[in-house]
Amino acid sequence: MTSADPLLRVNDLAVEFQTDEGTVHAVNGISYEISAGESLGIVGESGCGKSVSSLAIMGLVPRPAGRVTQGEITFGERDLLKLSTHEMRLVRGQQIAMIFQDPVSSLNPVYPVGRQIEEALRLHLKMSRPDARARAAELLDTVGIPAPEERVKDYPHQLSGGMQQRAMIAMAISCQPDLLIADEPTTALDVTIQAQVIELLAGLRRELGMAVILITHELALVAGFCDRVAVMYAGYIVEYAPVRELFARPQHPYTVGLMKAVPTLIGERTEQLANIPGSPPDLLDLPHGCPYAPRCPFVRDECRVEVPDLRDRGDGHPVRCIVDPTTGDLR
Amino acid sequence: MTTSAHPPADAAPATGAAANANGAASNGALLDVRQLVKYFPVTRGAIIRRRVGWVRAVDDVSFSISAGETLGLVGESGCGKTTTGNAVMQLEPPTSGEVVFEGRNLLKLDPSERRKARRRMQMIFQDPYGSLNPRMSVGKIIEEPMYVHRLHASRKERRDRVRELLELVGLSPWHAARYPHEFSGGQRQRIAAARSLAVEPSFIVCDEPVSALDVSIQAQIINLLRGLQDRLGVAYLFIAHDLKVVRHISNRIAVMYLGKIVELAGSDGLYDRPLHPYTRALLSAVPVADPEIETRRKRIILPGDVPSPVNPPSACRFHPRCPWAQARCADEEPKLTAVDGGRQVACHFWREIEDSGGVPPVAPSEALRAG
């Protein structure tokens, strides 16, 4: 976590939402960083705060209900949380781009896809209309859409789900951003189409040298794509490690449980899936102490007193837990 | 369950193959589906509706399921797996074919007979929010099927049975008084399971029962379904797109593509040695939770999208996307034929592909552009 000049550094970020039922603690002080060209995976189940933390980077936390209550998001030299709306608009799209799970609702249904890509090019790169039009077709070609000169005239509904997501990716890379945030980019897609999109993203990352944050609920997806992984639970990062290290030596009981709860595709068939009892905690009313304590097989009395720190024990693999899940003893 | 639920592929009932080959009734199968076809009309015109084509959702599908067995049905969206489940359940009357359940062809029964036969077959749906009536208490939801099928004479008996069922699926008897909105997605799938078991079925169609749930909850429901099968000996048609889940729960697996079964094999056989090019591509596309394996793995990237089932490609429906396709694949439809070990595959060249090591002649980067 101490590389000299990270591209993006998130420090102690917290996000809350005010609702009729009370305050939802969606993100509770998370820190991570990503260097140029690197790929970071953020993994967790629904409601763990993985999407909200990225919306905060983009300055897109829905207001007035949502609010960043603490922390800094340093991108290059600047704290993104201190930028004006206008300054933030210039960062968004041009330096940091984002693609979402559902391409249908991310694309404007009443404009052809080509025109939507042109819009970004003209706004950010001040391109002329004919130049932007030609570039839009080039971009569609880059993301592997066949007959791009024809497809630029298509409306979003005329494209399949996989093609829509590719059009979104074309739009996202149109200004050659330094960082691409992909929020569950393949969750709505079939597995063979998911393979196409992931292959595409990996290729673009290599060619354009952009950093990618991949947000997903699927641990297996980050295994082949990311350099480092943060595992989130109830608004906390519970474990943060290089990808090989994480899969070889998972250190948080939640990560261990998650890995054993998924059946295997190759090798020996899992006889019995690990049962993680109960459900994730209510973010309106987080339990005292470690949020995973009520479901944790290694829980101790200390766990229910205060949230453990995310502690790096000198191995570059910080864990937010006082118990070693391999032995069940205190660390 | 350790042994009984997972017999080796070779021990899997060969009834499916037998029924396909000669269409004759096979003994021992709980459910026998033969040449099942389901077409939906495509219409045009608001006032005068005329039919302009057919969606060939399910096109000549045959399989069988033995008592206590799980047959997995996998494929991507639009392949016809859900329609197959609905047609088996008679939720949508099949266009043609036979569905023989416990010895009787459901398509030939009169409505009251069919209703009686259907007591023994139940269904669990994907959406635990849409499949439970929000205005009924959980107790009423579970009691209703017993009432419909006149299973227990007295109210007291039915109530006792509701309590029993709630405990069976890992809930508490006092949950009976609560309403669906008070439960999480996983708990609702438990309620759906309890409801389906209320009428003592021998067969349950599970249509994507865990795909709406988070990973940690998925494992709970999968373990529950397997436990129930152990205890009650109920058979499942388990429809899902998640190949890891299907592998875990199934004895045998049928792979569907555009309304056809392209491969049917024992669970271990299918994953250790996929024969059909589509099965190969499907399995290679699933990410594995191991960075070491992922860096070494060779993915088969299929070009383009699944074609429309309104105008499916000629002959082999997979040929436009198949990396190994040859001229014959566009002219002659490969039949689902029995090959070694009691498994079936519908491909002219499966043996040649296997002999060549299964490496596609097209590189992933090329396939990506060839859409």
Image: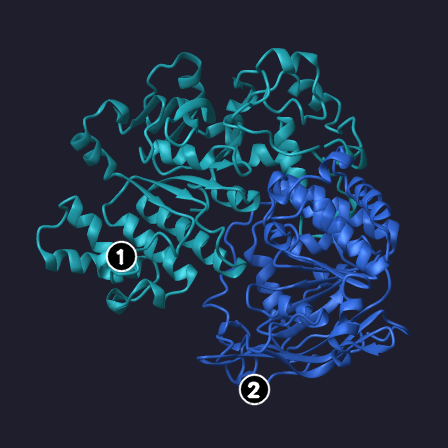
Chain colours: A blue, B cyan
- Side of A296 relative to B298 (left or right): left
Q: For the point 58% across and 58% down, which residue is it?
A: A260
Local SS, label 1: helix
As drawn, B202 above or below A6: above
Rendered image quadrant of residue B326? top right
The nearer-to-camera label among 2 and 1 is 1
Local SS, label 2: helix
Circle number at residue B165? 1
Q: For the point 11% across and 57% down, which residue is it?
A: B155
A168, B45: nearer the viewer: B45
Q: Same subunit under labels 2 and 1?
A: no
Q: Which of the chains bears the disc numbered 1? A: B
Furthest-bottom residue in view?
A305
Rendered image quadrant of residue A158? top right
B111, A268: nearer the viewer: B111
Q: Which of the chains bears the disc numbered 2? A: A
Q: Amino acid at mark 2?
A: Glu
Furthest-left residue in view?
B154
Residue A295 drawn at (x, y percent): 50, 72
- Side of A285 relative to A219 (left or right): left
As drawn, A131 above or below B129: above
Which residue lies under the disc numbered 2? A302
Q: Amino acid at mark 1?
A: Leu
B225, B313: nearer the viewer: B313
Distance between the alpha carbons at the discs numbered 2 and 1: 38 Å
